[in-house]
Amino acid sequence: MQAVRTRDVVLHAADGGRADGAAVVFINSLGTDLRVWDDVAAALASDFRLIRFDKRGHGLSDCPDGPCAIADHVADLFAVLDQFGVDRATLVGLSVGGMIALGAAEARPDRVARLVLSDTAHRIGPPGMWDERIAAVRAGGIASLAEAILERWFSAAFRSGRPDELALWRAMLTRTPAIGYAATCAAIRDADLSAAARSVRVPTLCLCGSADLATPPALMGETTALIDGARLEVIEGSGHLPCVDNPQAFTRQLAAFLKEN
């Protein structure tokens, strides 16, 4: 367990894998913590230095009161890189993690070697949708939305065939602090990363589960089109979290991209 102090929070982080390998930084999605990358990290540990962390308001990281912006998450990301002595890294962002990766690439392009954007978009949903979700979380807690969220996270095959694992993911989701969850909802609501996507000048791989109901392949295709030279690969049968739903296919795509660039 490693702690990273930023200007206003302490973040839980993990620095593992091959110490002298190229650095790959994983940024998790709304309602998850760094364990969402466990299977992928295990498969890549012999070749790459792997850095993961819990976003503010998630996992073991501090949960400040009030809303936050994507810029706050970007600043946290760079604080993690600074503490671990990483000047330049590949960023792998899932859902809101992809938005954070885009924001980081725009803010400090000199520190981003490559981008992998999974099940994300330059803009996700209309603001009213996020306002409704924030209100629902404040009124009934995350548990009141858990079943609908899990349907977006995972394919029908995962939900029906792996009930014990599903129960653990539900526990991770519902134990996320409601304040932290709502704050990141507000960050997504207020973010438009269109200009950031157009500014990217590094190799970029976009990945999306074919059964993703939150950021479907068509939306990811729109984001991919904004990034010069980016390509989109669809992971068949996976939902919004293909790194969990089908980690073997996700890792194959990611490893090939890292080794070819």
Image (spheres, rainbow, N blue to C red):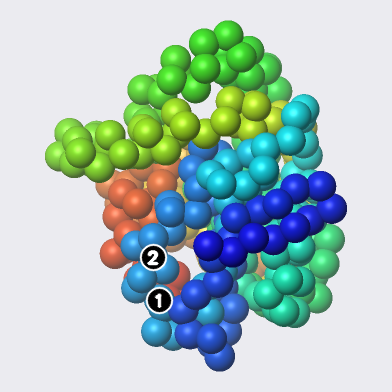
Residue 70 drawn above or below residue 114:
above
Residue 20 drawn above or below residue 251:
below
Q: How far across and down, in percent of the image, does residue 36 sit?
A: 43, 52
Residue 249 shown left or right of residue 24 in the figure: left
Residue drawn at 44 percent across, 85 percent down: 47
Instruction: Using the numbered discs, state the Cα–Cα distance from disc 2 to disc 1 in whole angstroms.
Output: 6 Å
Let me know if residue 12 appears in the view. yes
Query: Of 78 and 91, which appears nearest the observer?
Result: 78
Residue 129 shown left or right of residue 112 in the figure: left
Residue 191 drawn above or below residue 103:
above
Q: Would you call the spot at circle 1 few (<14 residues within 10 Å), some (14-19), or many (20 or more)?
A: some
Q: Residue 40 carries which label?
A: 2
Rendered-image quadrant of the C terminus: bottom right
Secondary structure under badge 1?
Answer: helix
Q: Residue 108 carries which label?
A: none
Give the amino acid type for the residue marked by disc 1 in the picture. Leu
Give the amino acid type for the residue marked by disc 2 in the picture. Val
Disc 1 marks which residue? 44
Residue drawn at 70 percent across, 52 percent down: 10
Query: Of 156 and 33, which appears nearest the observer?
Result: 33
Count of numbered marks: 2
Question: Contact (CB < 8 A) between labels 2 and 1?
Answer: yes
Q: How far across and down, in percent of the image, does residue 137 sit?
A: 57, 17
Write down the quadrant of residue 107 in the picture. Answer: bottom right
Let me know if residue 225 appears in the view. no
Q: How far across and down, in percent of the image, does residue 140 sit?
A: 52, 11
Write down the quadrant of residue 177 in the picture. Answer: top right
Residue drawn at 58 percent across, 9 percent down: 139
